Amino acid sequence: MTMGDRQMTDHNENGETRCGVVAIVGAPNAGKSTLTNALVGQKVAIVSPKVQTTRTRLMGIAITGDAQLLLIDTPGIFSPRRRLDRAMVAAAWEGATDADVIVLVVDAKGRVNEQVEAIVDSLAQRPGAKFLVLNKVDIASKEALLVLTANLNQRLAFDHVFMISAASGDGVEDLKQALAEKMPAGPWHFPEDQVSDVTTRLLSAEITREQLFLQLHDELPYDSTVEVEKWEERRDGSVAIHQQILIARESQRAIVLGKGGSRIKSIGAAARAELCEQLDRKVHLFLHVKVKADWAEDRDVYRDMGLDWVD
């Protein structure tokens, strides 16, 4: 994914550059993907109010000054119950491996529960700089923020603490500058106008899956996924994308389709509009629903999602 009009950046006087990996970890729904998008300056990761929206590791690429930040947006870390859960948690921790900086994102209006404590305790065993980012501070009281900061710093002495709102952008630039200062000297790994390592095929599936989270009932999105069946480049410069929405039970088909097919039309229209904007060309999107009871046990599905098969 690229952005052709991305602002050019000045290198330092010696022409030297810096580049490093920033792993963004935390519990589900802490705002990791929203923060990744804010740091990059445009949307590279799907977001929704529901937990566990992010399923795989993806990279957002941000530039500030002479530094290129390789931002690893990871799935939320939680107690896994099924194979897909285990694969998502494994992807999250793998994203933190060998990172130059690990950023722990915590929902500032929440509390330090067992889930957050377990993540902090695990981070204490890992090398590298660690930043604590309290997100959603715009809807948290000052007293609660101070208590939360003290509790977390007591468990792990973080190198820096930032209080931000990823949604509004407040405090994000200060965090970005601090991350840049921690990056080691070295060449940039990606062209200046590239903002993500996500393939356009995976991007298209993720955008449709985002609409499943936004438009369907609470439970169904977790029991579904999206696959790209066919990608057709057309002579007029447009692209035809054929996707199938995999669901686990026949009874879920009616939920996805909606009355008279109204829901799947709405999902398709919203996904198509965003794909046109992201790909900067006309998109023909064709969706159909397929019942596949064991899709969460299919190695090919995991490969397409960019997840490792975890026993």
Image (tube, rainbow, N blue to C red):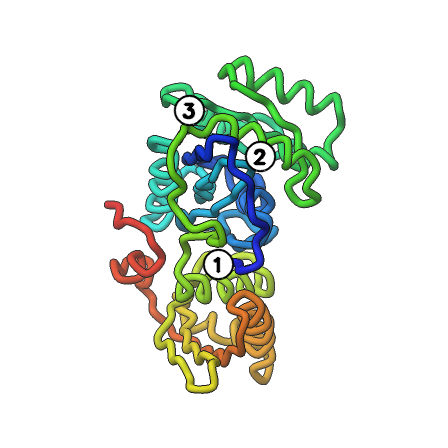
Q: What's the distance in space between the residues labelled 1 and 3, CA to CA?
A: 32 Å
In which quarter of the view is residue 304 placed? bottom left
Instruction: Please say if 101 is above or below 298.
Output: above
The secondary element bearing badge 3 is classed as helix
Q: Position of residue 212 (x, y in %)?
A: 53, 64
Q: Which residue is mark 3?
A: 123
Residue at the extreme front: 14
Amino acid type of the residue tagged 2 in the rendering: Lys
**Left or right, residue 26 beside residue 199:** right
Q: Which residue is mark 1?
A: 2
Q: Position of residue 19 (x, y in %)?
A: 42, 36
Along the line of sight, which residue is nearer the eye, 35 or 106? Answer: 35
The label nearer to you, 1 versus 3, is 1
Sequence-earlier tag: 1 or 3: 1
Whether residue 29 can be seen here: no
Q: Which residue is mark 2?
A: 176
